[in-house]
Amino acid sequence: MKRSGFTMMVLFFGAIGLLYVWMRVDLLRVGHDIEKLKQQELALQHRQEALQLQLSQLTAPQKIAKAAKDRFQLKMPEPGQIVMVASETAMAGIASSPHKALQVAHSY
């Protein structure tokens, strides 16, 4: 009977020891995962900043105007080439104020 109690105590402390080791290993694994995710987050933030800068550069009016001129051979329209198209809302505003006139260029 004494031997059985000793065996039970060894098994109990052995189980507690195994549980402690398992928890420490799991804690280290989770800590490693957290560190890896922090590094990934930092890399993604740098990538987002780089993409935001690239977007700002590509959408800059000067860059668009240069691309229109160089790549697509576009140029500013001549005064007679501009055609103004009014929406129904704008036309209603003009109809209510007859002194306003809508000018449309007919020469292309």
Image: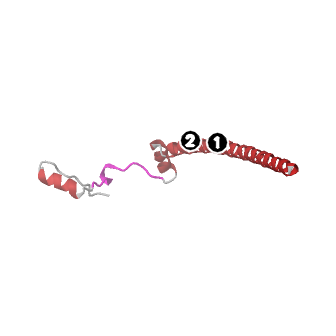
Left or right of 74: which side holds 37? right
Q: Nearer the viewer, residue 84 or 69?
A: 84
- Residue type at mark 2: give it: Glu
Q: Nearer the viewer, residue 84 or 61?
A: 61
Which of the numbered marks, if any, corresponds to residue 64? none
> To which residue does mark 1 refer?
38
Q: Element under label 1? A: helix
Decide which of 76, 88 is in the foreground and name it: 88
Mark 1 vs mark 2, CA separation in Å: 17 Å
Q: Residue at x 64, y 42 (%)?
A: 38
Horizontal and vertical percent for residue 103?
22, 52
14 within the magenta span: no
Percent of width and height locating residue 102: 20, 52
Q: Main secondary structure of the magenta part?
A: loop
> SS for tag 2?
helix
Left/right placement of residue 88 relative to residue 49 reads left
Q: Which residue is mark 2?
A: 49
Pinpoint residue 93: horizontal percent, then vertical percent.
17, 52
Residue 38 lies, with reference to residue 85, above or below; the image says: above
Report the amino acid beneath label 1. Answer: Lys
What residue span does the magenta drawing correspond to?
A: 73-84
- In the image, which is nearer the foreground, mark 1 or mark 2? 1
